Amino acid sequence: MSARVGVVGGGILGTVLALRLAQAGAEVTVLERAPSPGGLAGSMDFGGHRIDRFYHAITPADRHLIGLAAELGLAGELRFSTVGAGFFVDGKLHPFDGPRDLLRFRPLSPLGRARLAWFFALCQLRQSYDGLDEVPLEWWLRRHCGSEVTDRIWRPLLDSRFDGRHTELPATYMWARTRRMSGARRGASRREQLGHLRGGHERLIAAAAERAAEQGADFRLGAAVEELAMKDGQVEGVRVGGQTVPFDLTIATLQPPALRFLLPARLEGLLGAYPDRHLGLVCAVLKVRRSLVPFYVVNICEPTPITTVVETSHVVGTEHTAGLRLVYLPHYCAPDSPEQDEDDDSILTRFEGMLARISPAYRPEDVVDRTVQRARVAEPVHALGAHPRVAPVWPGVPGLALASASQVYPHLLNGDSVVHFAETVAAQAISRLGLGAVPPGRTSPGC
Ligand SMILES: Cc1cc2nc3c(=O)[nH]c(=O)nc-3n(C[C@H](O)[C@H](O)[C@H](O)COP(=O)(O)OP(=O)(O)OC[C@H]3O[C@@H](n4cnc5c(N)ncnc54)[C@H](O)[C@@H]3O)c2cc1C
């Protein structure tokens, strides 16, 4: 009999794990609480149009995600566009798209611009984050960019991205972030290119789930796992609907704030290896008659109730929304922050109030539809001096693997890094279970 593997969670991570394990001959069952796979990268009906619940783009450097799309026959469905970013500083929008805009970037003095250019080059030249994990981010920014750039640009951006608290961040965060965005810059002009898969990331997840199902994987939707089932010190499966579903190996893909509810008391100590802090978000989504900002993303360098403005239509087009444009206004906040329970109307009033300051084109009467999406847990905050830096996938409990987005490090959390992590964990599981060879082109065990 082949190994029975239970995967808890059917987001990108769980679905790619299921695909690779099923391809290697495991008998895989995915247990997903929601009625469809997708998780944070899922879609929703928005007034008759199917759209991403949260904004999702792909960079040309996202080789794991692009490789998976090609393997699943979706290469022709990837579309890239040249897009720009903007900065909102001192009540004005400034373009910031490549070296030419940096030279003309008025919010900074010529010295500030030169220091910022030097900082971007430094992050590119530094191939490894060795040593950066122990360096406080703000100290590092001041050292390389100076006080003007740090106080006018970086601090306000970090304030809104980390809900007003970022002193615990290591320099690694900005190194990884700068390198990811550099991966989006192409050609002599170094302008930013972003892409999407027609139909969104969810299409990739659906295709991976379909391929896994062809290999025998069973996707149980609407199956909320209640607890890990234990016997004689080992995990023997999961409890769903009051029944035990037995597995030889259970892989939980949930981040700690959700995982903690599944752990029997004797395994709660495993949570100590994870970051203490996680961020969720509250995100207003607007469907509007006209473009509100000429950029994909606007970075806001002043006190703000929203982290950023993302007009995804610059990348995803408007064919699927009958010519109407999509604008996302996210606010990252703690899983238990009051905004998570605040009523939609008051969120929309506050968030659209900020949008009106940023976009002269904004008119409430042009908003055809609006909604508020929430995720209590979106990402971990990896802090300075954390040991271990990432929690082990194999925690030393027979029958259990813990593989969640909280263990993706130092790369930023995105579809590409999650696909890579899933494939690495799958390769390890295949080897431990003594299954067939690692599927061709896939990462070998040992992360
Ligand atoms: C606002 C935002 C913008 C983003 N932008 C981008 C982007 O531009 N590009 C990009 O590539 N990535 C982006 N990402 C990141 C990307 O969405 C995530 O990294 C990825 O979706 C994480 O997938 P996951 O499978 O690890 O987790 P999740 O998607 O959270 O999946 C976990 C799954 O577990 C299920 N679950 C929870 N509890 C249980 C239970 N008890 N039993 C059974 N199932 C359960 C949930 O329903 C969920 O489906 C963005 C994320 C956010 C929030």
Image (cartoon, rainbow, N blue to C red):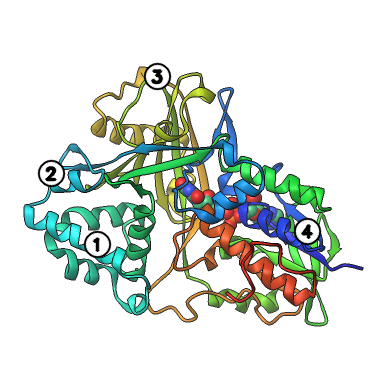
Q: Residue at x 46, y 35 (%)?
A: 344
Mark nearer the viewer, 4 or 1: 1
- Mark sitting on residue 289: 3
Rounded to the nearest angstrom, the CA distance separating label 2 from label 3 is 31 Å
Q: Which residue is mark 2?
A: 104
Q: Upstream in the sequence, badge 3 or badge 4?
A: 4
Rounded to the nearest angstrom, the CA distance separating label 1 from label 3 is 39 Å
Q: How many marks?
A: 4
**Circle 1: is it few (<14), some (14-19), or many (20+) Cα within 10 Å?**
some
Q: Residue at x 30, y 31 (%)?
A: 293
Rounded to the nearest angstrom, the CA distance separating label 1 from label 2 is 18 Å
Q: Upstream in the sequence, badge 4 or badge 1?
A: 4
Contact? badges 2 and 4 (CB < 8 Å): no
Q: Which residue is mark 1?
A: 121
Residue 376 showing in the rendered view = no
Q: Is residue 296 left or right of residue 74?
A: left
Q: Which residue is mark 4?
A: 22
Amino acid on which the number 2 mark rests in the picture = Arg
Which SS class for mark 2? loop
Amino acid on which the number 4 mark rests in the picture = Ala
Which SS class for mark 1? helix
Look at the picture and state if 356 lies above or below 304.
above
Q: Upstream in the sequence, badge 1 or badge 3?
A: 1
Rounded to the nearest angstrom, the CA distance separating label 2 from label 4 is 53 Å
Mark nearer the viewer, 2 or 3: 2
Q: Upstream in the sequence, badge 1 or badge 2?
A: 2
